[in-house]
Every structure is written in C-alpha cells, then in structure tokens.
Amino acid sequence: MEFETEKCCDIMYVIGIAPPPYNLYNYQGYMQRTFQFASENDVIMNFTSDGVVQGVGFNGTVYNIDCACNSGTSQLHQNNTLLQINSPGLLSGAPTYCPNLNCSWTVQFPNDYEVVLNVSMVQLRAVSQFDQLAVKDNFGRTILTTNSTIYYGQRKFVFTSGQFLVNFLSSPITFFPPQNAQPGFLLDMMLVKKTIRRTSIRFSDEYFMADISTRDFAGGINATYEYLITARPGRQVNVHFFTPLYGIVIIQIYDGTDTASKMIDTSFLFDNDTVVDGIPLSVSSTGQSLLIQIRPNLYNNNDKLDFQAMTTDWVQGE
C-alpha cells in the first residue's frame, strides 16, 4: 500500500490487518509505502476523505501468497537426478514469503552417488535478522547458514554421505517496507555418480602403516578415494589426521568392509583442530576392517588441497 493523498484527514481504515486485539490499521499520507500481512481471513478497507480537492488518492495491491513449505523427504536416484528447494511462493511470483515459517526438507540419495548443491539465490528480508537459511549434513553439522539480504558466500557444496537437511525460518514480523527485488531463496541440486578410485590396504607384521595424504589425489580432485583397510587378526584399524579437514575434504568412514556398514560420525574432525596438545585426532574401527572414502573439495579456492593422514593397526606401547 502506498498513500499519496494530503497528509491530514484522508484516511484508509483497514480492519483485519493489524495484530489483535484491535485488528484496525489507519493509513495516512505521511506514512511510507508498506507491505503487511493480514491477521484475519477477511479484510475490510474503508477510505474517507475531507473533501479537499488537492489530494491524489491511494494505490494498493492485494496478494494471495502460498505459505506451504512442502516439507518432507525427497529421494534422489538415477531416474530422478534434479531437485529444487525454494522459499514458499518464490517460483509463483509472490512479492515476499510468509512470516512465521519453519520449513524443513530432507534429501536422501544412494551411497554410491553424491549431490552437488548450487546456491542459485539467497536474498532474505532486510527487516529481520531472524530469517535464516541453514543446510546441515547427515550428522547435523552446519554446512551453510545465512540471514543475508545479499549472499556473498560459497555457491557450491558437495554432499556424499547419503543425506542432508535444509531448514528455513522466517520471523513473525508481518509489517515491513517492500524490497526492490523479490526476497527468498532457491537451491538447485544435481545427483552425480561417484567416480571412485579404490585401494586395498592389508596390514602385516612387516607392513603396518600407510600414508593416505594429499599426493594420493594425483588421479584428480573430482573423484572419491576409497581405502579398504584390514588390520592383522585381533587388531583394530586406526586413522590419524594431521591437517584441518574443513573446506579441504569430505570424509565418510564405515565401520566395516563396505558402505552397508555403520557410518562413523566424523563431525568432530571438522569442528576441532586435528592436532590437540601434539596428539592427532583419530578414528578407530570396532573390528578388523574400516572403509574410508575421501572426497577432495572440488570448490575449494585454494591452489593446494593440503590433506595429511595415515592409517595403522599398531598401537603405542608395543
């Protein structure tokens, strides 16, 4: 609504648009152009003027905006490789998104595939810092979070662990100035078959340590490097990490011989320094075998992906 009549006594009374208990909003010429959501299903507008011929009137537009999130679980597979997730109303041309939204989407896909997520658009409402878009991995680790009116962050992300989550929150504010551009967000996802380069490591009394560091990415960074590691009988596999992982690699570790085995939560490797008090962070198997998949970050802006780790079934004190 914008009101361009003289400032004194021409008034638009709008019933059903202000918060309870009054439900009444008086709009006059000195007020700025505004956008407001109704508080009632029925809105009554009553315009009165004082008869002075110098006024120029008012102009307003009424929208019916879809607030449905369509939350739920989406399955990507070889016959369904593309997916879009967006703020409600964006693709139908709504001028903004609804207040009080709490939308959650889960995206699932096979373990022999990966999903490339592209941030096509993020432009949230400037009036509130409570509007927030977040993307989390399979273990709940936050990969992307923003409340930006203009997004300058990383545009592409790779997910490899079979599942991730998208959440969108909007504040309860129902009254705000219109933005020049349509606010909201749009995420595009594409399912891609993993390119896996497999290596089998079997420890013995003569060979009980192996390096799985950066130089083993010589086959290209657009690949997943898989190591099936088998310890000597009665021993466990240990993997020690010597460099930070966040932004460098994506890792899945399975407590067994294949991807059907239980996946180990590796969130702590990304949320902490990999070397604490001189001791590297480590992951161990419960049995004799461990399957580890290492995916270099294709969208890292650094010239070099410095990843250093080693694996062994030897324990200190032997």
Image (spheres, rainbow, N blue to C red):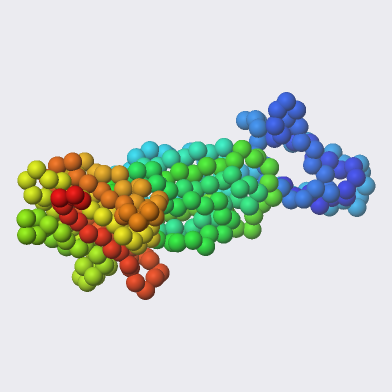
Q: Report the side of 119 relative to 128 (left or right).
A: left
Q: Position of residue 164 (x, y in %)?
A: 35, 46
Of 154 and 241, which appears nearest the observer?
241
Q: State whether residue 232 is above or below residue 194.
A: above
Q: Position of residue 220 (x, y in %)?
A: 24, 70
Of 83 and 66, which appears nearest the observer?
83
Instruction: Please identify the quarter of the rendering in which residue 22 is found.
Output: top right
Residue 6: in sight, yes or no?
Answer: yes
Specify the farthest residue to the bottom.
303
Of 174 and 199, which appears nearest the observer?
199
Instruction: Please identify the quarter of the rendering in which residue 243 is found.
Output: bottom left
Residue displayed at 46% across by 48% down: 134
Specify the farthest residue to the front.
317
Q: State whether residue 171 is above or below residue 211.
A: above
Q: State whether residue 197 is above or below residue 90.
A: below
Residue displayed at 60% across by 58% down: 181
Residue displayed at 83% across by 48% down: 29
Q: Report the side of 69 relative to 282 (left or right).
A: right
Q: Report the side of 261 relative to 125 (left or right).
A: left
